[in-house]
Amino acid sequence: RNRFKGKDYLGFKDMTREEIEFITDLSLDFKRKWTAKEPHEYLKGQVWAGLFEKNSTRTRNALERAAADLGIKIVYLRPDEMQMTRGEPLKDTCRVLDRYFDGLFIRTFGHEIVEECANWMKNPVINGLTSLEHPTQGIADLMTIKEKKGKFEGLKICYSGNLYNVCYTTMIMCATLGMDLYIACPQGLEPDNQIWQETKERAKLSGAKIVFTQDFDEALKEADVVYGMSQYSMGQTEKEIARLKQAYLPYQITMEAMNKAKSDAIFMHCLPAHRGEEVTDEVMECSQSVIFDESENRMHSIKAILAAVAN
Ligand code: CP
Protein backbone atom coordinates (compact mmCIF):
# COMPACT_ATOMS: atom_id res chain seq x y z
CA ARG A 1 0.00 0.00 0.00
CA ASN A 2 2.97 2.39 0.29
CA ARG A 3 2.68 4.78 -2.65
CA PHE A 4 4.88 7.34 -0.92
CA LYS A 5 8.39 5.88 -1.44
CA GLY A 6 10.63 8.58 -2.93
CA LYS A 7 7.71 11.05 -3.10
CA ASP A 8 7.21 14.46 -1.51
CA TYR A 9 4.79 14.92 1.38
CA LEU A 10 3.44 18.42 0.91
CA GLY A 11 -0.20 18.46 1.93
CA PHE A 12 -3.50 16.67 2.39
CA LYS A 13 -4.81 18.38 -0.74
CA ASP A 14 -2.44 16.16 -2.75
CA MET A 15 -3.46 12.94 -0.97
CA THR A 16 -6.28 10.48 -1.51
CA ARG A 17 -8.43 9.05 1.26
CA GLU A 18 -6.52 5.76 1.04
CA GLU A 19 -3.17 7.56 1.35
CA ILE A 20 -4.28 9.58 4.40
CA GLU A 21 -5.60 6.42 6.07
CA PHE A 22 -2.41 4.53 5.19
CA ILE A 23 -0.14 7.08 6.88
CA THR A 24 -2.45 7.24 9.90
CA ASP A 25 -2.40 3.44 10.31
CA LEU A 26 1.38 3.38 9.83
CA SER A 27 1.74 6.06 12.53
CA LEU A 28 -0.37 4.01 14.95
CA ASP A 29 1.83 1.00 14.18
CA PHE A 30 4.96 3.03 14.95
CA LYS A 31 3.34 4.10 18.22
CA ARG A 32 2.75 0.45 19.05
CA LYS A 33 6.44 -0.33 18.33
CA TRP A 34 7.53 2.63 20.49
CA THR A 35 5.27 1.51 23.37
CA ALA A 36 6.52 -2.09 23.10
CA LYS A 37 10.13 -0.79 22.92
CA GLU A 38 10.59 -2.67 19.63
CA PRO A 39 13.69 -1.34 17.83
CA HIS A 40 12.89 0.22 14.43
CA GLU A 41 16.13 1.65 13.05
CA TYR A 42 14.91 1.01 9.49
CA LEU A 43 16.73 3.94 7.90
CA LYS A 44 20.14 3.65 9.57
CA GLY A 45 22.72 5.64 7.64
CA GLN A 46 20.35 8.19 6.09
CA VAL A 47 21.09 11.89 6.66
CA TRP A 48 18.28 14.46 6.25
CA ALA A 49 18.26 18.26 6.38
CA GLY A 50 15.80 20.01 8.72
CA LEU A 51 15.31 23.61 7.59
CA PHE A 52 13.18 25.74 9.92
CA GLU A 53 12.37 29.32 8.88
CA LYS A 54 9.93 29.66 11.80
CA ASN A 55 10.07 28.71 15.50
CA SER A 56 8.99 25.25 16.58
CA THR A 57 8.83 23.20 19.76
CA ARG A 58 6.80 20.13 18.76
CA THR A 59 7.60 19.71 15.08
CA ARG A 60 11.34 20.16 15.38
CA ASN A 61 11.81 18.00 18.47
CA ALA A 62 9.37 15.34 17.24
CA LEU A 63 11.41 15.22 14.02
CA GLU A 64 14.70 14.88 15.92
CA ARG A 65 13.37 12.01 18.08
CA ALA A 66 11.55 10.25 15.23
CA ALA A 67 14.69 10.41 13.10
CA ALA A 68 16.89 9.13 15.94
CA ASP A 69 14.62 6.09 16.42
CA LEU A 70 14.74 5.34 12.67
CA GLY A 71 18.54 5.69 12.62
CA ILE A 72 18.44 8.90 10.55
CA LYS A 73 20.78 11.79 11.37
CA ILE A 74 19.13 15.22 11.06
CA VAL A 75 21.30 18.21 10.18
CA TYR A 76 19.43 21.26 11.47
CA LEU A 77 19.77 24.22 9.10
CA ARG A 78 19.27 27.83 10.15
CA PRO A 79 18.44 30.10 7.20
CA ASP A 80 20.23 33.05 8.86
CA GLU A 81 23.49 31.04 8.75
CA MET A 82 23.08 30.17 5.08
CA GLN A 83 23.55 32.14 1.87
CA MET A 84 19.80 31.97 1.14
CA THR A 85 19.27 35.00 3.38
CA ARG A 86 21.94 36.82 1.31
CA GLY A 87 20.06 36.28 -1.91
CA GLU A 88 21.13 32.82 -3.14
CA PRO A 89 18.18 31.52 -5.17
CA LEU A 90 16.12 28.73 -3.62
CA LYS A 91 16.59 26.61 -6.74
CA ASP A 92 20.37 26.67 -6.23
CA THR A 93 20.13 25.96 -2.49
CA CYS A 94 17.78 23.02 -3.15
CA ARG A 95 20.01 21.42 -5.78
CA VAL A 96 23.04 21.71 -3.49
CA LEU A 97 21.20 20.23 -0.48
CA ASP A 98 19.92 17.45 -2.71
CA ARG A 99 23.54 16.35 -3.33
CA TYR A 100 24.28 16.06 0.42
CA PHE A 101 21.07 14.82 2.01
CA ASP A 102 18.58 11.97 1.61
CA GLY A 103 15.65 14.33 2.09
CA LEU A 104 14.52 17.75 3.31
CA PHE A 105 12.09 18.50 6.14
CA ILE A 106 11.11 22.16 5.88
CA ARG A 107 9.01 24.65 7.85
CA THR A 108 8.57 27.86 5.89
CA PHE A 109 6.21 30.68 4.92
CA GLY A 110 4.40 30.43 1.55
CA HIS A 111 3.28 27.01 0.34
CA GLU A 112 4.86 27.79 -3.05
CA ILE A 113 8.27 27.57 -1.32
CA VAL A 114 7.87 23.86 -0.46
CA GLU A 115 6.50 23.25 -3.95
CA GLU A 116 9.60 24.91 -5.41
CA CYS A 117 11.87 22.79 -3.17
CA ALA A 118 10.05 19.65 -4.32
CA ASN A 119 10.45 20.77 -7.91
CA TRP A 120 14.22 21.20 -7.65
CA MET A 121 15.03 18.23 -5.43
CA LYS A 122 15.08 14.58 -6.48
CA ASN A 123 15.00 13.39 -2.85
CA PRO A 124 11.76 13.67 -0.83
CA VAL A 125 10.59 16.95 0.69
CA ILE A 126 8.32 16.95 3.78
CA ASN A 127 6.21 19.97 4.65
CA GLY A 128 6.64 20.86 8.33
CA LEU A 129 4.18 23.81 8.02
CA THR A 130 3.45 26.39 5.36
CA SER A 131 0.82 29.08 4.84
CA LEU A 132 -1.56 26.50 3.36
CA GLU A 133 -1.05 23.20 5.18
CA HIS A 134 0.28 21.46 8.28
CA PRO A 135 0.10 17.85 7.08
CA THR A 136 2.30 16.25 9.77
CA GLN A 137 -0.03 17.80 12.37
CA GLY A 138 -3.03 16.47 10.45
CA ILE A 139 -1.89 12.86 10.81
CA ALA A 140 -1.23 13.32 14.55
CA ASP A 141 -4.76 14.70 14.88
CA LEU A 142 -6.22 11.72 13.02
CA MET A 143 -4.28 9.29 15.23
CA THR A 144 -5.66 11.05 18.30
CA ILE A 145 -9.25 10.96 17.01
CA LYS A 146 -8.91 7.27 16.09
CA GLU A 147 -7.48 6.45 19.54
CA LYS A 148 -10.16 8.35 21.43
CA LYS A 149 -13.23 7.83 19.23
CA GLY A 150 -12.37 4.63 17.33
CA LYS A 151 -13.61 5.95 13.97
CA PHE A 152 -13.76 8.99 11.70
CA GLU A 153 -16.95 8.74 9.66
CA GLY A 154 -19.97 10.36 11.25
CA LEU A 155 -18.07 12.40 13.86
CA LYS A 156 -18.65 16.13 14.28
CA ILE A 157 -15.74 18.50 14.90
CA CYS A 158 -16.22 22.05 16.16
CA TYR A 159 -13.22 24.23 15.26
CA SER A 160 -12.57 27.63 16.81
CA GLY A 161 -9.52 29.54 15.64
CA ASN A 162 -7.80 31.18 12.72
CA LEU A 163 -8.46 30.29 9.08
CA TYR A 164 -4.96 29.26 8.14
CA ASN A 165 -2.78 26.17 7.68
CA VAL A 166 -4.13 23.92 10.49
CA CYS A 167 -7.70 24.87 9.63
CA TYR A 168 -7.10 24.12 5.93
CA THR A 169 -5.55 20.70 6.61
CA THR A 170 -8.49 19.98 8.95
CA MET A 171 -10.97 21.03 6.25
CA ILE A 172 -9.47 18.66 3.67
CA MET A 173 -9.13 15.90 6.30
CA CYS A 174 -12.79 16.09 7.37
CA ALA A 175 -14.10 16.42 3.82
CA THR A 176 -12.05 13.39 2.74
CA LEU A 177 -12.87 11.13 5.67
CA GLY A 178 -16.56 11.98 6.13
CA MET A 179 -16.36 14.00 9.36
CA ASP A 180 -18.64 17.02 9.76
CA LEU A 181 -16.67 20.20 10.47
CA TYR A 182 -18.26 23.35 11.89
CA ILE A 183 -15.87 26.28 11.82
CA ALA A 184 -16.96 28.97 14.28
CA CYS A 185 -15.48 32.33 13.29
CA PRO A 186 -16.34 36.02 13.04
CA GLN A 187 -18.16 37.37 10.00
CA GLY A 188 -15.97 38.58 7.14
CA LEU A 189 -13.24 35.93 7.35
CA GLU A 190 -12.83 33.83 4.21
CA PRO A 191 -10.79 30.62 3.73
CA ASP A 192 -8.25 30.24 0.94
CA ASN A 193 -10.23 29.69 -2.26
CA GLN A 194 -8.14 26.77 -3.58
CA ILE A 195 -8.58 24.88 -0.29
CA TRP A 196 -12.29 25.70 -0.13
CA GLN A 197 -12.91 24.41 -3.68
CA GLU A 198 -10.96 21.20 -2.97
CA THR A 199 -12.83 20.76 0.33
CA LYS A 200 -16.23 21.11 -1.36
CA GLU A 201 -15.31 18.56 -4.06
CA ARG A 202 -14.19 15.99 -1.47
CA ALA A 203 -17.19 16.64 0.80
CA LYS A 204 -19.50 15.85 -2.13
CA LEU A 205 -17.92 12.39 -2.33
CA SER A 206 -17.79 11.63 1.42
CA GLY A 207 -21.05 13.33 2.44
CA ALA A 208 -19.26 15.43 5.10
CA LYS A 209 -20.83 18.77 6.07
CA ILE A 210 -18.27 21.59 6.12
CA VAL A 211 -19.94 24.66 7.60
CA PHE A 212 -18.70 28.17 8.44
CA THR A 213 -20.86 29.71 11.15
CA GLN A 214 -20.93 32.77 13.38
CA ASP A 215 -23.12 30.78 15.78
CA PHE A 216 -20.74 29.09 18.25
CA ASP A 217 -23.62 27.12 19.84
CA GLU A 218 -24.52 25.60 16.45
CA ALA A 219 -20.88 24.52 16.02
CA LEU A 220 -20.67 23.05 19.53
CA LYS A 221 -24.00 21.20 19.53
CA GLU A 222 -23.45 17.40 19.44
CA ALA A 223 -19.72 17.88 18.70
CA ASP A 224 -17.48 14.87 19.37
CA VAL A 225 -14.31 16.96 19.14
CA VAL A 226 -13.79 20.61 20.10
CA TYR A 227 -10.64 21.84 18.37
CA GLY A 228 -9.01 25.05 19.50
CA MET A 229 -6.50 27.06 17.54
CA SER A 230 -4.79 30.43 17.93
CA GLN A 231 -6.92 33.35 16.73
CA TYR A 232 -4.00 34.75 14.72
CA SER A 233 -0.81 33.40 13.22
CA MET A 234 2.94 33.94 13.30
CA GLY A 235 3.92 36.99 11.27
CA GLN A 236 0.70 39.06 11.54
CA THR A 237 0.97 42.74 12.58
CA GLU A 238 0.13 43.91 16.12
CA LYS A 239 -2.84 45.85 14.72
CA GLU A 240 -4.23 42.80 12.89
CA ILE A 241 -3.72 40.60 15.99
CA ALA A 242 -5.62 43.11 18.18
CA ARG A 243 -8.49 43.19 15.65
CA LEU A 244 -8.71 39.39 15.50
CA LYS A 245 -8.57 38.97 19.30
CA GLN A 246 -11.53 41.35 19.61
CA ALA A 247 -13.51 39.65 16.83
CA TYR A 248 -12.91 36.16 18.28
CA LEU A 249 -14.02 37.07 21.85
CA PRO A 250 -17.38 35.20 21.49
CA TYR A 251 -15.58 32.04 20.33
CA GLN A 252 -13.38 31.36 23.36
CA ILE A 253 -13.48 27.68 24.39
CA THR A 254 -14.57 27.74 28.03
CA MET A 255 -15.96 24.91 30.20
CA GLU A 256 -19.39 26.38 29.46
CA ALA A 257 -18.71 25.95 25.74
CA MET A 258 -17.39 22.38 26.29
CA ASN A 259 -20.60 21.54 28.13
CA LYS A 260 -22.58 22.41 24.99
CA ALA A 261 -20.78 19.65 23.06
CA LYS A 262 -21.40 15.91 23.66
CA SER A 263 -20.70 14.86 27.24
CA ASP A 264 -17.80 12.65 26.02
CA ALA A 265 -16.37 15.29 23.65
CA ILE A 266 -12.60 15.63 23.63
CA PHE A 267 -10.66 18.90 23.48
CA MET A 268 -7.80 19.11 20.99
CA HIS A 269 -5.29 21.86 20.18
CA CYS A 270 -2.18 21.63 18.02
CA LEU A 271 -0.32 23.90 20.52
CA PRO A 272 1.14 26.30 21.38
CA ALA A 273 -2.07 27.62 22.96
CA HIS A 274 -2.75 31.11 24.21
CA ARG A 275 -4.49 30.40 27.51
CA GLY A 276 -7.07 33.10 28.17
CA GLU A 277 -7.49 33.85 24.46
CA GLU A 278 -8.87 31.01 22.28
CA VAL A 279 -9.17 28.66 25.29
CA THR A 280 -9.25 28.89 29.05
CA ASP A 281 -6.68 27.32 31.35
CA GLU A 282 -9.49 25.22 32.85
CA VAL A 283 -10.30 23.59 29.48
CA MET A 284 -6.62 22.93 28.74
CA GLU A 285 -6.30 21.09 32.07
CA CYS A 286 -9.70 19.35 32.13
CA SER A 287 -10.21 15.58 31.87
CA GLN A 288 -11.59 15.94 28.31
CA SER A 289 -8.34 17.56 27.12
CA VAL A 290 -6.14 15.23 25.04
CA ILE A 291 -3.58 17.84 24.03
CA PHE A 292 -0.49 16.00 25.23
CA ASP A 293 -1.51 12.70 23.59
CA GLU A 294 -1.94 14.78 20.42
CA SER A 295 1.53 16.32 20.89
CA GLU A 296 3.09 12.89 21.47
CA ASN A 297 1.45 11.71 18.25
CA ARG A 298 3.43 14.34 16.34
CA MET A 299 6.50 12.14 16.90
CA HIS A 300 4.86 8.91 15.76
CA SER A 301 3.31 10.53 12.69
CA ILE A 302 6.53 12.24 11.60
CA LYS A 303 8.29 8.89 12.00
CA ALA A 304 5.72 7.18 9.78
CA ILE A 305 5.98 9.91 7.13
CA LEU A 306 9.81 9.70 7.11
CA ALA A 307 9.63 5.89 6.84
CA ALA A 308 7.05 6.04 4.04
CA VAL A 309 8.79 8.58 1.79
CA ALA A 310 12.45 7.63 2.36
CA ASN A 311 14.27 6.09 -0.58
N1 CP B 1 1.83 22.27 16.52
C1 CP B 1 3.04 22.71 16.12
O1 CP B 1 3.33 22.74 14.91
O2 CP B 1 3.85 23.07 17.12
P1 CP B 1 5.28 23.78 16.94
O3 CP B 1 5.02 25.13 16.28
O4 CP B 1 5.85 23.91 18.31
O5 CP B 1 6.11 22.93 16.04
Image (cartoon, rainbow, N blue to C red):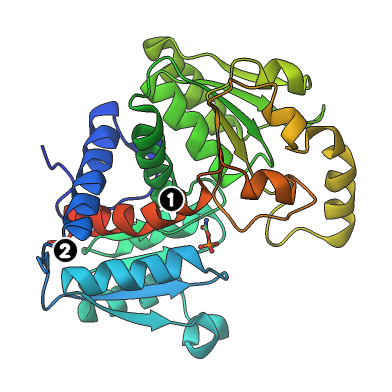
- In this rendered view, identify the residue nearer to me: 136 or 273: 273
User: What residue lies at 10% left-to-right and 37% top-to-bottom?
Assistant: 1
Residue 293's disc is 1
Residue 288 figure quarter = top right
User: What residue lies at 11% left-to-right and 69% top-to-bottom?
Assistant: 41
Q: Is mark 1 within 8 Å of ligand 1?
A: no
- In the picture, measured across the screen, residue 248 lies left or right of residue 122, that is right
Q: Give the percent coordinates (x, y) of residue 146.
A: 35, 33
> Label 1 crowding class (10 Å Cα cut-off): few <14, some 14-19, many 20+?
some
N-terminal-most mark, 2 or 1:
2
- In this rendered view, identify the residue nearer to me: 56 or 234: 56
Q: CA distance from mark 2 to mark 1?
A: 18 Å
Of the residues shown, which amino acid type is indicated by label 1? Asp
Q: Give the percent coordinates (x, y) of residue 24.
A: 28, 40
Q: Secondary structure at mark 2?
A: loop
Residue 54 figure quarter = bottom right
Residue 37's disc is 2
The extreme bottom residue here reads 81
Residue 105's disc is none
Q: Is residue 299 visible?
A: yes
User: What residue lies at 31% left-to-right and 50% top-to-bottom?
Assistant: 9
Q: Is residue 107 visible?
A: no
Of the residues shown, which amino acid type is indicated by label 2? Lys
Q: Give the percent coordinates (x, y) of residue 131.
A: 57, 51
- In this rendered view, identify the residue nearer to me: 149 or 50: 149
